[in-house]
Amino acid sequence: MIRFHNTLSGKVEAFEPVAPGLVKLYTCGPTVYDFPHIGNWRAYVFEDLLKRFLIFSGYKVTHVMNLTDVDDKTIRGAKAKGVGLEEYTRPFIEAFKKDLETLNILPADHYPRATGHIQEMVDIIKVLLEKGFAYKKDGSIYFAIAKFPAYGRLSKFNLEDLRPGSRGDADEYEKESVHDFALWKAPKEGEPVWETEIGPGRPGWHIECSAMSSKYLGRTFDIHCGGVDNIFPHHENEIAQSEAASGVKFVNFWLHCHHLVVDGEKMAKSKGNFYTLEDILSKGYDPREVRFLLLSTHYRKMLNFTFEALEQAKAARQRIGNFLGELKDVTNGTAETAEVLPLIETAREGFVTGLEDDLNISESMAVIFSLIKSLNPLLSRGEVSKSAAQKVLDLFSSLDEVLAIKPSPIRSASGKIAALTGVSATGAVGTVVKKQPSDMPNRLDSEIQERIEARQKARADKDFALADAIRKELLAEGILLEDTKDSVRWKKIVLPRT
Ligand SMILES: [Zn+2]
């Protein structure tokens, strides 16, 4: 049974969609006034994990993500550049869609733009005026929060904080200044204007999500996502507008993802710690390494982005690639599948159980690495049959429908682990060996992997002396490293006696 933490109740609840088998999902999309930063991508990757897991669990998902192309920020940006909104936002929309694809994020069913849904917004505002939840003032229309007693339920603030009658026009504001918010803004010099039944002007930010979600998903739908900074005022205002107009519950489950910080600090252009996806990829990282890092911290925890953490994600992914390579290389292992099959089943179950528990990704990833750890010794002893190896490969393909981070299997050149066949290393290798393997402690696979990662890091840091020293140190223990295009493979070799 799938359970999610619902911001509305503050509790973890069993998930049940309104219509059996169908999940209606709305995720707040980007305000297309700039390129998204990795903090934004964290939210979109989390939403993709959620969506992919729902699909994996057998649900059909209808997903809507809006594009905010008219608000304070886009208007300011277009004005500064002296162009229209359409021209100003177009390159940001295109870049956003390209990055979605780069990060392996499944496309939404609809990407409605605010400027294409002005009539739908006007229709809701008309109802709010008729029902007495909204009022006109100086050509603008405001939502009267005092008329909606449930106001503040999502963001959990004291109703005494409400200051009915005070108004604000800004799209975004702090909790401390909670006030009646603008549904429709009177025309202003230099701002776009729509001539409508409720008068000339342009919409506020919040009304667009109420209008576009109900158009594509209906008045009540299952899940609404965003970052924690959307809770107030944006989502609080969406609930107020939608429920006041429709008279029915707006959304059953609210899922919010926590902030991303960089090196423990809030990201800011002024601090030089502000990254777009492009900034990171230009340093030579694979997009799936970035995706892996962004989804590997539970969505309700703060994610601290560091390049060290990205290196770890890269190494972990490489470990999976190495493992898949070993599986592909299996030709005719000796053992029957009896030992392997239960391990596969346990891993599949553990992976699913983890994600069912409010998307506990850490638990699910731990299960995967524990499977790798259990199978590695069997693989190196040749005790995994070809059909069992295929079953493990199938498992990884299936789990990757959720994770979408799978590396290509890293194949070994020889196709066989040398230690098994007793093949000795080449003379050239032997000449640099000073010690015999029997003198050395038997390293665990995980330790070898750690040393390889240390060498990779040294190479990335251009510390070639250290990298070479690590290679030689491992070789002295009978562990031969092979650099392939994407990765490093290692094999145990029998060293010649000196
Ligand atoms: Zn929104």
Image: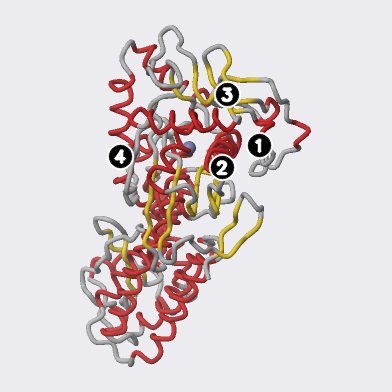
Q: Which label's residue is closer to the chain start, 2 or 4?
A: 4
The residue to which callout 3 is attached is 142
From what the image shows, is residue 432 above or below residue 126? below
Residues at badges 4 and 1 in contact (C-beta under 8 Å)? no
Q: How far apart are marks 4 and 1 (CA)?
A: 37 Å
Which of the two discs, 3 and 2, labels the residue nearer the N terminus?
Answer: 3
**Residue 152 visible, this orientation:** yes
Mark 4 Cα-neighbour bin, 10 Å: few <14, some 14–19, many ≥20: few
Residue 264 can be seen, yes or no: no
> Hey, which residue is sitting farthest front in the picture?
130
> Which of disc 3 and disc 1 is earlier in sequence?
3
Residue 323 at x, y = what percent?
Answer: 35, 70
Count of numbered labels shown in the rendering: 4
The numbered disc on residue 97 is 4
Vertical placement of residue 27 versus 352, above or below = above
Dot 2: element: helix
The disc label shown at residue 243, or none: 2
Answer whether labels 3 and 2 touch (C-beta < 8 Å). no
SS type, badge 1: loop
Q: Name the residue under label 1.
A: 148
Q: Nearer the viewer, residue 355 or 394?
A: 355
User: What is the spatial separation of the Cα atoms under label 3 and label 4, in whole angstroms?
Assistant: 34 Å
User: Camera-side residue: 38 or 217?
Assistant: 217
Looking at the rendered structure, the kind of residue marked 2 is Glu
Mark 3 Cα within 10 Å, few/some/many (few <14, many 20+)? many
Assign a secondary structure to mark 4.
helix
N-term mark: 3 or 4 = 4
* Residue 217 in picture, x, y percent from top left: 41, 48
**Pointer 2 and pointer 4: residues touching (CB < 8 Å)?**
no
Callout 2 crowding tier (Cα within 10 Å): few <14, some 14–19, many ≥20: some
Callout 4 amino acid: Lys
Q: Report if the beta carbon of the residue with label 1 is closer than 8 angstroms to ligand 1.
A: no
